[in-house]
Image (spheres, coloured by chain):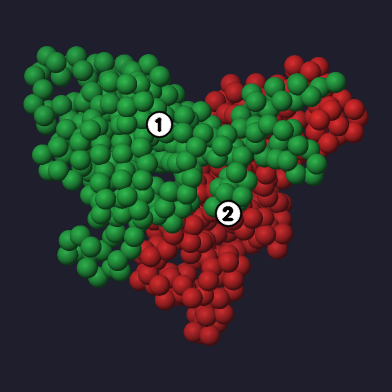
């Protein structure tokens, strides 16, 4: 059970003067249950890659398999039930006159009874922590964070096994952002595979188990946050930052001469400090 | 003029939606801003933070008379915003950059977009060329002057918007979540420009943001919640108030999270930036 990508290449507007190869030579596998972050600077090809994972784009060359089944024009609706896609600013796509109708929209295509639809809508709302009292509200009366929850709910009603998200936390305030990351963590612990794009290295370090770095259309690094963020100079050469906390401890390590492992989250930073205090190297 | 001249003054300002015009009749009356008073000094760099719906953007729109107070007064650049006669001068002096870069660029070339405001106020051609030139250079978008704006990145578009404001020779720029839709590189470029304008040109900068790392260099931070101004102070004063931060669900900057005085590790100093973090650690080194 996995997303398997083999020798993927995608060219926009082939055989025209605007021809541009966005991604090339990508082969990788994402196992069911993983929490993966795809990073890369604007224009690196990361969104193009993500759009291949549920057939929004079909490869110019190469193949993509979902649970062993190759994505083709013929099985798109089945693939998209299995692989949900949450676009950037998904709240811009809300259009029904009530929250309930918007969440239920994707289910209309399936031959389901009203009771079955209702059960699925309530289950998804419960998962994302959306108050049922809002069901009959207009989507325009909700806060930014609530709107985004409604949009994600509209994808979750189809019970996807894989969830793709393009910048799920962008534009949210502090609490909205933390709630969103916690929601994705929770979905992942319930078995949903998460693949997200993010520009926030701090967020990525906090939630992802694996980071795939795309540069100039192909995979430049693939590893744990500790592995990827240990290469501060390489990332800088690709106009990417490492988390603020990583820089802090790298600088401290350099100035103090104390060798330290790569620190990627505040929590790890606190552990390092505790360790240094226990070893008697730091005295408060 | 004194150095601590008040540049923008809010005196008991309340703004309610649903009380102006017919189109809002169906909506319920809602106080977006409630009895807010503060003053911003000329040449300072002030940030306004608060959760979604706290009234930050409403405060921004009140600053240059895009909306008028339901009660109370807003004095901008020495003028009362509710006096019709002053409104064009206020809008020239207090420029506004919005969130979505695609919503504020109208011309077909960068150069023309920057010149748009000047054309409207009838600046002579020679002077217009000189001012556009200067503004483009200051914002580092000179090399794109003949480009079509839609081909630029988000960060470049926002810098073009700032150039358009600069050409009008403003004394204050209000950025309403102008970095929210940008990638980290674009965000940094925009911040670098406004910090430079603040320091070198003495332009008052008011930055509304959710990114806590953007506010660590501010002279002053205003915190909004449910339409009210709940706290004002330096970044250190704001972030030292743990109760406020947690009540309002605000984020601490990443470096600050490492040094939170929990589990007995009190460093006795508020750390906001990685530089401060490194220096605190070095001080405690044996």
Spot the red chain and give its letter.
A
Residue B204 locus on image (x, y percent): 35, 28
Residue in front for this viewpoint, B76 or A275? B76
Given the image, what chain letter belongs to the residue carrying mark 2?
A: B
- When the figure is inspected, residue A242 is found, relative to residue A144, above or below; the finding is above
Tell me how far mark 2 sits from mark 1, CA to CA.
Answer: 33 Å
- When the figure is inspected, residue A48 is found, relative to residue A237, above or below; the finding is below
Residue at 76% over, 21% down? B283
Which residue sits furthest right?
A279
**Badge 1, how many Cα within 10 Å: few under 14, some, many 20+?**
many
Q: Is residue A10 left or right of residue A212?
A: left
Residue at 53% over, 85% down? A115
- Residue B107 visible? The answer is no
Residue designated by label 1: B155
Q: In which quarter of the image is residue A123?
A: bottom right
Q: In which quarter of the image is the N terminus of chain A?
A: bottom right
Residue designated by label 2: B247
Q: In which quarter of the image is residue B256?
A: top right
Residue B261 locus on image (x, y percent): 73, 41
């Amino acid at each position: 059970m996995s997303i398997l990508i083999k020798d993927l290449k995608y060219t926009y507007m082939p055989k025209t003067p605007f021809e541009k190869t966005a991604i090339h030579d990508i082969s990788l596998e994402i196992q069911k249950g993983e929490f993966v972050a795809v990073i890369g600077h604007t224009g690196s090809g990361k969104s193009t890659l993500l759009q291949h994972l549920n057939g929004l784009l079909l490869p110019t060359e190469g193949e993509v398999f979902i649970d062993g089944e190759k994505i083709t024009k013929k099985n798109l609706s089945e693939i998209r039930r299995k692989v949900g896609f949450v676009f950037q600013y998904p709240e811009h796509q809300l259009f029904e006159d009530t929250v309930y109708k918007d969440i239920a929209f994707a289910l209309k295509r399936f031959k389901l009874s009203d009771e079955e639809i209702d059960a699925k809508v309530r289950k998804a709302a419960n998962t994302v922590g959306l108050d049922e009292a809002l069901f009959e509200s207009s989507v325009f009366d909700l806060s930014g964070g609530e709107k985004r929850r409604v949009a994600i709910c509209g994808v979750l009603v189809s019970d996807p096994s894989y969830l793709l998200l393009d910048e799920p936390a962008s534009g949210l305030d502090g609490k909205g952002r933390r709630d969103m990351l916690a929601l994705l963590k929770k979905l992942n612990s319930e078995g949903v595979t998460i693949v997200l794009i993010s520009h926030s290295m701090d967020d990525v370090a906090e939630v992802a188990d694996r980071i795939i770095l795309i540069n100039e259309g192909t995979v430049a690094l693939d590893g744990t946050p500790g592995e990827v963020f240990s290469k501060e100079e390489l990332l800088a050469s690709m106009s990417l930052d490492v988390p603020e906390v990583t820089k802090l401890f790298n600088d401290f390590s350099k100035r103090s001469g104390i060798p330290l492992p790569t620190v990627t989250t505040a929590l790890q930073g606190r552990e390092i400090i505790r360790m240094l205090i226990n070893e008697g190297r730091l005295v408060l | 003029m004194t150095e601590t001249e008040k540049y923008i003054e809010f005196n008991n300002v309340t703004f309610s939606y649903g009380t102006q015009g017919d189109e809002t009749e169906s909506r319920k009356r809602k106080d977006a801003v409630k009895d807010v008073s503060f003053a911003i000094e000329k040449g300072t760099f002030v940030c306004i933070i608060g959760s979604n719906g706290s009234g930050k953007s409403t405060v921004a729109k009140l600053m240059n008379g895009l909306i008028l107070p339901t009660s109370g007064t807003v004095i901008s650049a020495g003028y009362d915003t509710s006096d019709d006669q002053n409104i064009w001068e206020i809008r020239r002096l207090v420029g506004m950059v919005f969130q979505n870069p695609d919503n504020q660029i109208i011309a077909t070339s960068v150069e023309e977009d920057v010149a748009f405001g000047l054309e409207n106020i009838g600046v002579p051609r020679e002077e217009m060329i000189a001012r556009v030139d200067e503004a483009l250079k200051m914002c580092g978008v000179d090399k794109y002057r003949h480009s079509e704006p839609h081909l630029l990145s988000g960060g470049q578009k926002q810098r073009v918007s700032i150039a358009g404001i600069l050409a009008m020779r403003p004394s204050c720029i209000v950025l309403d979540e102008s970095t929210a839709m940008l990638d980290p590189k674009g965000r940094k470029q925009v911040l670098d420009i406004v910090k430079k304008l603040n320091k070198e040109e003495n332009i008052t900068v008011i930055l509304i943001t959710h990114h806590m790392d953007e506010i660590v260099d501010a002279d002053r931070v205003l915190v909004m919640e449910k339409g009210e101004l709940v706290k004002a102070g330096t970044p250190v004063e704001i972030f030292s108030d743990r109760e406020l931060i947690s009540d309002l669900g605000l984020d601490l900057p990443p470096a600050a999270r490492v040094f939170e005085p929990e589990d007995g590790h009190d460093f006795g100093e508020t750390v906001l930036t990685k530089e401060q973090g490194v220096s605190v650690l070095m001080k405690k080194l044996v």
